[in-house]
Image: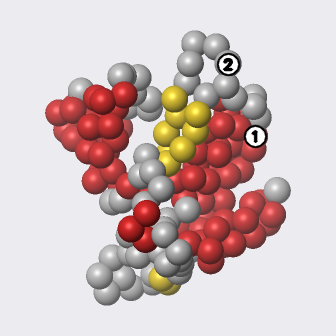
Amino acid sequence: AAMQLVRWPKQFDTIVCGNIFGDILSDEASMLVGSLGMLPSASLPSSGPGVFEPIHGSAPDIAGTDAANPLAMILSAAMMCQYDLARPELAALLEKAVEAVLDEGYRTRDIATEGGAGETLVGCVEMGDLVAAKVKALA
């Protein structure tokens, strides 16, 4: 699976595996999208509610600096809407809002490119505000 993830990542929609192997694969996958700050995750039991969180954890080294990328948390909320709350339309709305903000060129520092033409560097709070505004505009 690890080699296939690098070789042909589009063949995967969901990967189900144990926690340790999942940690390895999620770190590997983060390099495919450019940052740990872009990847949501879910731990889904056979019954009952799941746990939804970004794969990057709490990032204590940048706490309080407005540098974190909130998109993985927003996308984790979309997964919660899809899988736990049976609200796929809300999941789609959140995903579309994130995609639209990225399409407009907004970037947190972890996904900004050096000399990124057409990119606007924003902090965590502003990125969250941009996505919230886009949700309202798309709803």
What type is the residue that disc 1 sits on? Glu
Q: Mark 2 points at which residue?
A: 48
Q: Earlier in the sequence, mark 2 or mark 1?
A: 2
The residue lying toward the viewer, choosing from 30 and 88, is 30
In this image, 136 relative to 105: left or right?
right
Residue 94 visible in the displayed image: yes
Q: Name the residue under label 1.
A: 89
Tag 1 secondary structure: helix
The residue lying toward the viewer, choosing from 65 and 122, is 65
Tag 2 secondary structure: loop
Quadrant of the image for the N terminus?
top left
Residue 119 spot, x, y in % from top left:
45, 81
Residue 28 spot, x, y in % from top left:
26, 44
- Mark 1 crowdedness (10 Å alpha carbons): few <14, some 14-19, many ≥20: few
Q: Which residue is drawn at 75% across and 60% down?
A: 135
Q: Which residue is drawn at 75% across and 31% down?
A: 85
- Mark 2 crowdedness (10 Å alpha carbons): few <14, some 14-19, many ≥20: few
In this image, 27 relative to 13: left or right?
left
